[in-house]
Image: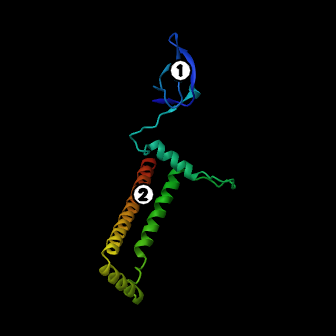
Amino acid sequence: MLIAVRSFTTQYDGREVEVIAGVTRIDAAHDLADEFPDAWTPEPNPHANGRTLEGLLNRARERSTPRRSTPARPRLPLEAELRLRRERLAELEARERERPAAAADAAEDVFWRGVDALLESSDPVLARQRREDREGTKLMDELDALQARNSRAEVEELSSWLDPG
């Protein structure tokens, strides 16, 4: 399907037809699409949630295009760029796994955890607020992790589609 990008009036089948930008839709094989090719654009799929293959390719191309007036750098083919991004994500994940955990039993941490426990035991409202804050933080961390996994899956899916070998 095509959607109008500009409004105009024309004759079609012996009658006057009004085309309204952003409203009028026609099939790509329609006579008006051939007669006014600059007046139409492909209609986005509302059920694809922005994840059509064309959308992914366009986003990847936009991200690889410099937005500033810097000297042009040589552009990598899309497949090579996606491969590099996948390798970089794997490297960052490996670093994250190797990073030593913060010393949770440090004296200062133990002290402040004790202070928090005392405050929460004496004030039920504060205890509830802090519990809700911890739950909210946990949910946001889970959401961030899920978004990162989804992004990696999209990149891998696109790169496997582009580089089947």
Q: Nearer the viewer, mark 1 or mark 2?
A: 1
Name the amino acid type tagged 1: Glu
Mark 2 nearby-residue class (10 Å; few <14, some 14–19, many ≥20): some
Name the amino acid type tagged 2: Arg
Cα separation between marks 1 and 2: 45 Å
Q: Residue at x 47, y 47 (%)?
A: 56
Q: Is residue 30 above or below residue 138?
A: above
Q: Quadrant of residue 48?
A: top left
Element marked by disc 1: strand
Residue 51 position, x and y percent, is 43, 46
Q: Earlier in the sequence, mark 1 or mark 2?
A: 1
Residue 130 position, x and y percent, is 35, 72
Query: Residue at label 2?
Result: 152
Residue 54 position, x and y percent, is 47, 42
The quadrant of the image that shows the N terminus is top left
Mark 1 nearby-residue class (10 Å; few <14, some 14–19, many ≥20): few
Q: Looking at this rendering, what residue extends furthest in the bottom direction? A: 107
- Which label was assigned to residue 18? 1
Q: Residue at x 40, y 73 (%)?
A: 97
Question: How is the structure coloured here?
Answer: rainbow
Q: Residue at x 53, y 20 (%)?
A: 18
